[in-house]
Amino acid sequence: MRVAALLTCLLAGCLAEKPHPCESPALLSGLLSVSTQNEKLWTVAKYLYDALGQRVRIMELGTYENKSFTYDALLLFREAAMYEIHEHNRTCLKKPLKADFQPMAIPKDATLLGQFVLGSSSGPGEGLLVNSWAGDLPDKSGKYVSTVTEFGCVPVTSVSHTEQFGWVVTSFVNNIKGITDPSQLNPPEFCPDAEMKGSEVEPTDFLSLFLSKK
Amino acid sequence: MRVAALLTCLLAGCLAEKPHPCESPALLSGLLSVSTQNEKLWTVAKYLYDALGQRVRIMELGTYENKSFTYDALLLFREAAMYEIHEHNRTCLKKPLKADFQPMAIPKDATLLGQFVLGSSSGPGEGLLVNSWAGDLPDKSGKYVSTVTEFGCVPVTSVSHTEQFGWVVTSFVNNIKGITDPSQLNPPEFCPDAEMKGSEVEPTDFLSLFLSKK
């Protein structure tokens, strides 16, 4: 009886560690949506994320101040360049990108809010164990709350507060480890090699970049 | 080779059915949080839900217009009675409850928005398959979007729009099938048996009840 109890304990929870800040997989693809409290911005985007090559591609479809827009950008942090890509007319704008690559991660100084199960823990395939973390935004402009999976550190939601939009909720779905189409992380052939003049973009992280262009 | 492909297909998806509207488990316990776009109301509640006995208990801790509050209510739909319970001073208020019990479910006329994986499908325990449904609120006062797990029909989030609060987001976590403490679905001993006079409460569903008292 005691052996059975010990075994159950070992399998169920004794091996479980206290959640720790973590880094998301180096290669991720998926969908994300951004919605804002003041309803100014709402957008859905396909994203490709390559922390090894420090490359991010975002293909957005959204509305900004009730006008719909599309936006397709490739960010090459190692080359300090970004490309705004217009597939429909095969044009491309290369801009300097003055920013350090910020990997998707729970920062080491984040505070654990709690561990939760989305769905139910009562049956197989019915639940997802996640950890929610809070902390200060990199530029100390406000707070964030980020939720990632316990197993895999895959992003689920991120909530932060900005002056421009109020609360901003980013939700990630259909994430897979790996890059679905690696060619989408290289500039298309119709993109210029020479750098074009333009204002420098200074994103502080993956998401602020996503918002700063508005 | 063709056999292998067929097998993979069978295992991975051929057996998967198109999502259908579904009813949540008859007995559920868990936590829910409600947050509103205009920030008037924010609350976290422990809930017990018994569709067999048509009983609901909600134990809330929240803020309403920047003032914190607690609220503890037991709703007995079959008896058309609700109890407002104040454990701290062992008092209890019995009120008539004029409403039909509405089971937690995706209505048959709901429209499937899509099927998604929260987290990742790349590893075991890293993802949760969910279905998102949209439809009209029971009183046709607006729209809702509800997300439930594909396996088990466990609620994950529900978003609706109300005049009073703007967008209202309800998130469910730590759900388990069953009732953690069945005694909490009976009125405490200090509750009156005789019905007290009071205004009738007319919730249209589980959640509107939750909001209508504000």
Image: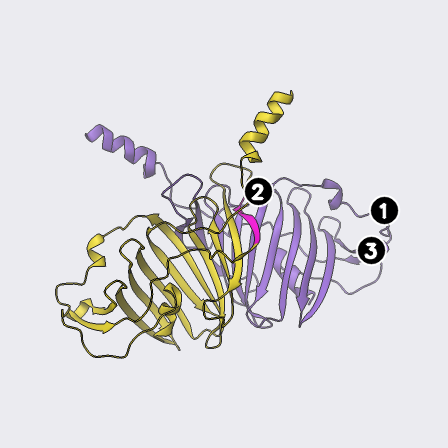
Chain colours: A yellow, B purple
What amino acid type is highlighted by mark number 3?
Answer: His
Residue type, numbered disc 1: Glu
Q: Chain of mark 1?
A: B
Whichever of callouts 3 and 1 sits on the residue coming sooner in the sequence is: 3
Q: Is residue A61 left or right of residue B85?
A: left
Q: Nearer the viewer, mark 2 or mark 3?
A: 3
Q: Which residues are magenta?
A: A113-120
Number of other residues with Cα within 10 Å of mark 2, as a class: few under 14, some 14 to 19, many 20 or more: many
Q: CA distance from mark 3 to mark 1?
A: 14 Å
Q: Which mark is residue B25?
A: 2
Helix, strand or loop under label 3: helix
Q: Secondary structure at mark 2?
A: loop
Task: Classify 10 Å Cα crowding around label 1: few (below 14), some (14-19), many (20 and above).
Answer: few
Work out whether mark 1 precedes mark 2 in sequence or the reverse, and give the earlier one: 2
According to the picture, the residue beneath numbered tag 3 turns out to be B88
Question: Where residue B13 sits in the image (x, y, percent)?
Answer: 33, 39
> Does the rendering let one see residue B195?
no
Instruction: Name the element at disc 1.
Output: loop
Foreground residue, A61 or A74? A74
The Cα atoms of the two marked residues, 1 and 2, are separated by: 29 Å
Query: The disc labelled 2 sits on which kind of residue?
Result: Pro
Q: Which mark is residue B189?
A: 1
**Is residue A116 inside the magenta stretch?**
yes
